[in-house]
Amino acid sequence: MKTLVILSSILGDRSNSKQLADHLIARIKSANPAAAVKIRDIGAQPLPYFDGATVGALFTPSDARTAEQHRIVELGDALIAELMEADRIVFAVPVYNFSLPAQFKTYLDYVARAGVTFRYTSEGVPEGLVKGKEVLVLTARGGKAEGTPADTLTPYLRQMLGFLGMDDVTFIAAEGMAMGEVAALEGVAQAKQRIDALLADAAPVGIAA
């Protein structure tokens, strides 16, 4: 099984969502030391903003694209290819101002491509084409909102990922990160325990290089 890890925090090693992803990777490597890991850190290396030039490149026929337009499309193609090749996808997504980081929204804009990762049927019904994936979303937030109407991140991501065909999604949140040291440590510990339990229930996996 191939696993792709997407990091999106801007805080680097100080990131709680990255800490959860690192714990997950360590657990997999512990079970299989030969496992390689495919990590894309869009917090440390942000994708170019998805703007009008990006859309223009995608809608320009290949033989009419400029060198810059080819570069833009090739980046999007690479993001989609690694998404399609993965069996398990891990999104590490911190909560910024009640929502996801701009870096991760840009990522979703790149991989949501009509005719490639989703399409509309003849009846006009959307169909996601990124199918058969096991998806894990690792989140971290300052307060506590999981399972309440105040959790505005989970419904959006569930809808967006489902639109692309990813409907087997597990959310694990480290909460209380801004509620004092004790609460933060407890929140991370509980999230790590849930990761351990999830992996214990799963079959051994490898991670794609």
Image (tube, rainbow, N blue to C red):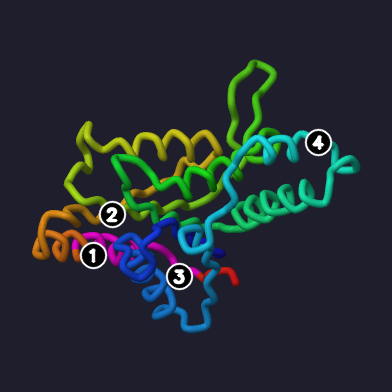
Give the CA distance from mark 4 to mark 3: 43 Å
Say whether disc 3 or disc 1 marks the residue closer to the N-terminus.
Answer: 1
Relative to 16, is 184 on the left or the right? left
Quick check: marks 1 and 2 in contact, CB under 8 Å?
no
Where residue 63 sits in the image (x, y, percent)? 90, 43
Closer to viewer: mark 3 or mark 2: 2
Range shown magenta: 190-205
Quick check: marks 3 and 2 in contact, CB under 8 Å?
no
Give the CA distance from mark 1 to mark 2: 15 Å
Q: Point out the residue furthest to the right here.
A: 63
The residue labelled by disc 2 is 140
Give the CA distance from mark 3 to mark 2: 26 Å
Residue plotted at (32% across, 46% down):
96
Relative to 87, is 20 on the left or the right? left
* Number of residues whose C-alpha sits closer than 10 Å to that of mark 1, classed few (under 14), some (14–19) or many (20 or more): few
Which numbered disc covers residue 193? 1
Q: Is residue 205 above or below residue 56?
A: below
Closer to viewer: mark 4 or mark 1: 4
Q: Point out the residue furthest to the bottom here.
A: 33
Say whether disc 4 or disc 3 marks the residue closer to the N-terminus.
Answer: 4
* Number of residues whose C-alpha sits closer than 10 Å to that of mark 2, classed few (under 14), some (14–19) or many (20 or more): many
Q: Quadrant of residue 186?
A: bottom left
Q: Main secondary structure of the magenta part?
A: helix
